[in-house]
Every structure is written in structure tokens, then in C-alpha cells.
Image: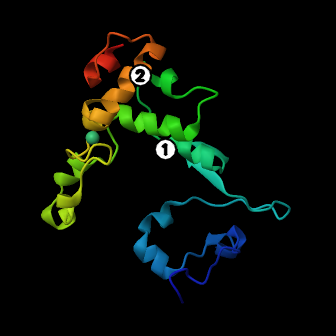
Amino acid sequence: MNANGGFNHKSKVADIWINGRWGWPIQWMNRTPALTNIGPCNLWEEMQDKICWKVGDKIMDFSNSAVWQTTRTREEEVPWSESVWFSQCISKHAFLLWLIIRRKLLTQDKIIKWGHARRRGMNMMCCLLCYKDYDSHDHLFFSCYYSTQVWYHIRAYAEMENVQPICSDVSRR
Ligand SMILES: [Zn+2]
């Protein structure tokens, strides 16, 4: 008998509920003793099997949404969330902005901190906008010469004419 205990994706609950008892394959019982704790099953011949999702005592129809809503970690909403996520936002841009604000882009300054084996070729890495330094969040968006010039051109549109290209100054606004 294979690891699936002779069952496949077309198997039904009725295939394992035999004469009023669970008929778990022995290798499943050895691997997951908690199977003995599963209570009796009420099968109605007219009902179709369906996949459910159980949270505590609550049983609901299975959906990716249900799994996501019940397994995700919820944190306090950040004050800048509506600046990133809004109904007309472009998902790709919003996701990138979210990564940037969280400082989660995989920038070269982070890669440098990895072990030597992963740093092969780092001598060749540098900011592709100015070729003068490793890139980092601060460098890419503010201290790079190219980015600084972009900031000086666009800051008026954001009514930030007097704000210098310094990350902490820009994010404070
Ligand atoms: Zn640069």
C-alpha cells in the first residue's frame, strides 16, 4: 500500500467510514495518532462530499478566502495604509510602495550582509542609476544623484517644495 493508504483525490469519506467505524490505514495511524480522536461520522447517502474548513468549533465551506481570513496575522492598521492601498491603485505599484515603506526590497546593502557564499559577484554590484555605491532604500530613493534630481523635479507636485531628499524628512510629511 502506498503512502496514500490506497486513497486518491477521488476517494470519499464513505470509503474510509466502514460499518460504523473509521478504517484508517495503519501507516496513517502510526504517523498521526490523533486520528483515533476523530469522532463518529454521520453519513447521509443523498449528500455529496464537500471540503470544509474548521476553525475551533465552527465549520464553514472551504475557500481560499476562508483559509486566508482565519490563518493570517492581523496587526494594527498603519496610518499610511490608505496612501498605499486605495480603490484605483495599481496593484503592482501599491505592492512595491508597501515593500519600500517596510524597507523590504532586496537591496544590495542587505545582500552584502549575507554569507560569503552568497556574495560572489558583489564586487560587480552597484546602483544602476549612478554606479557609485551599493543600492539601499535610502540610496535608491533619496541619496542617489539621479534620484535626488528626480525628487527636485517632482516635490512641487506633492506640495513639498522645501523638503530635502532625505527619507526621514519625506516620510514625516
Ligand atoms: Zn545611485
Q: Secondary structure at mark 2?
A: helix
* Side of 48 where 120 appears, left or right: left
Residue extending furthest toward the left = 116
Find residue 164 and report its horizontal and vertical position in percent.
28, 17
- Eyeballing the image, is 88 above or below 9? above
For badge 1, the amino acid type reads Thr
In the rendered image, which quarter contains the N terminus? bottom right
| Circle 2 residue | 153
In this view of the protein, can residue 141 be seen by the observer?
no
**Along the line of sight, which residue is nearer the eye, 33 or 21?**
33
Q: Within the image, what quadrant is residue 132 found in?
A: top left
Which residue is painted at 28% across and 25% down in the image? Answer: 167
In the rendered image, which quarter contains the C terminus? top left
For badge 2, the amino acid type reads His
**Along the line of sight, which residue is nearer the eye, 18 or 168?**
168
Which residue is painted at 41% across and 74% down in the image? Answer: 31
Find residue 40 and report its horizontal and vertical position in percent.
62, 60
| Circle 1 residue | 71
Q: Is mark 1 within 8 Å of ligand 1?
A: no
- Eyeballing the image, is 14 above or below 77? below
Which residue is painted at 70% across and 71% down in the image? Answer: 12
Which is closer to the viewer, label 2 or label 1? 2
